[in-house]
Structure formats: C-alpha cells, structure tokens
Amino acid sequence: GAVVSQHPSWVICKSGTSVKIECRSLDFQATTMFWYRQFPKQSLMLMATSNEGSKATYEQGVEKDKFLINHASLTLSTLTVTSAHPEDSSFYICSAQSGQFYEQYFGPGTRLTVT
Amino acid sequence: GEDVEQSLFLSVREGDSSVINCTYTDSSSTYLYWYKQEPGAGLQLLTYIFSNMDMKQDQRLTVLLNKKDKHLSLRIADTQTGDSAIYFCAETDSWGKFQFGAGTQVVVTP
C-alpha cells in the first residue's frame, strides 16, 4: 500500500512552453501533498504545500505564477511549469501525506529538461 | 532557516557495518527520518524515529538519536551491494514541514 505515482516520469519541452506534472496517491487519500525540486547531487527543496480544495502555500522564493499547483481531489495534485526555461530543468518530486507526519510517501519523480 | 547536515560520501566494504551521521538544528523536531534514493528514483522511507526516543532497530537498521546533541545516525549491519544509494536524513517540525539534508552517497565495494 501507500503508493504515489507521478506522470510523466520524464519530459523534454521547448523553452517558452508549459508542462504539467501529475501526482497521484493510488491507494489512499492524501490530506496534503507536497512538491519538491531536486538539483543534481543536492537535497530536496520544498516548493509548495497543497491541501485539497484550497490554494497552495508556496515557500519563499518560489514563483507561484510560474509553478501553478492544483489539488483537485484527495488523490490528485498537479504542478504546471509555465513558460519553462532551461533553468527550470530539474527533478521534481511530489509526496502525499495520509495522516501523521511520518505517513508521507514520495513519488518516483519527474525529470524535466527544457531545451 | 533550520539546517540538516550530513557527510557527503561514505565508502564501505561488503559485509561491514555502515554508519551514516546527521546533525540538525531544529529543537522543535517531531520526527526524524532516513530515506534511501537510488539513481533516477524517488525517495524510499527506510525508518523514522519519534523525537522522544533514543533508539530504534528494524532488522539490519539501527537508528540512534541524541536529542541533546541533535545528532542522528543510521547503522546498516552487514552492508550489501544493494545498499549502495544516497541516504537522506530529514526531520519534520511541529507543523509537519520536512527539512532534508544534502544526502550521503554510500558506495559498497566488494
């Protein structure tokens, strides 16, 4: 149990286009979902926290108009990178929390490359 | 902000024990965690410990927490080649917000 999927697993897009990444909790309802960004050989940096039906809370320095987060249901959150640029290329990981803090499960990540 | 620090690299021989160390600064930590990340994959929760515990053992894994020194360690007994990965130390504050360390690359040699 406690599986989180992400789609796509990797995507290449041209500069200026938008890309949507989906995060789904497959066998549980997630009260809260999180989006992280990971640069090569670095740690995960929390971008935003989203609760179903409400606006996401963004971390300092993360542009909310560039990284649009929608948490449409208790099993689905999406991250849209708008007007992507090469510096947005990164590994994006979502996680879903089912209850207690330690009940947070991570997706496999999405590798975004912007050319 | 709060910091979580860990050494960047550890090399260990197959069959030996590995010890990965981590220090943190947040005195309001509720839980502390160890995650494993294999190349190109997401994070896999290995184990976690509540902040009022000082030790937790789970098969080959032993977690030690020294709350006074804000020091967390993960010991892997009988390390295998499949244990080669990046190991992340993390903690959650009283709001449940995660703070991750930079990760320790563990390389297991035959």
Image: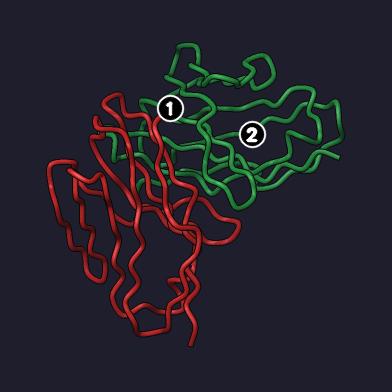
Chain colours: A green, B red
Q: Which residue is mark 1?
A: B1
Give the residue furthest to the front. Answer: B69
Query: Is label 2 on the same chain as label 1?
Result: no
The vertical placement of A98 against A49, above or below, is below
Query: Quarter holding the C terminus of chain A?
Result: top right
Number of callouts: 2
Q: Residues within 10 Å of mark 2 (few under 14, many from 20)?
A: many
Q: Nearer the viewer, residue A76 or B102?
A: B102
The chain that hosts pointer 1 is B
In the image, residue B84 sits, relative to residue A46, either above or below, namely below
**Left or right side of A49 for B95:** left
Q: Mark 2 against mark 1, which lies toward the viewer? A: 1
Residue drawn where x is 50% and y is 58% of the image: B8
Q: Is residue B104 left or right of residue B66?
A: right
The image position of residue A73, as x and y in percent, is 46, 22
Seen from the viewer's position, the closer of residues A83 and A73 is A83
Residue located at (14% from left, 51% from top): B54
For this orientation, the residue located farthest to the bottom is: B110
Residue at image location 33% in from the left, 42% down from the top? B24
Amino acid tagged 1: Gly
The chain that hosts pointer 2 is: A
Where in the figure is residue B109, as x and y percent of width and height?
A: 49, 83
Secondary structure state at the residue bearing disc 2: strand
Q: Position of residue A82 (x, y in %)?
A: 74, 22
Marks 2/1: CA distance? 28 Å
| Residue contact at pointers 2 and 1, CB within 8 angstroms | no
Identify residue for label 2. Answer: A21
Task: Determine crowd level at label 1: few under 14, some 14-19, many 20+ residues with C-alpha closer than 10 A.
Answer: few
Q: Looking at the image, which is closer to me, B90 or B19?
A: B19
Question: Percent position (x, y) of residue B69?
Answer: 22, 46
Q: Which amino acid type is shown beneath numbered disc 2?
A: Ile
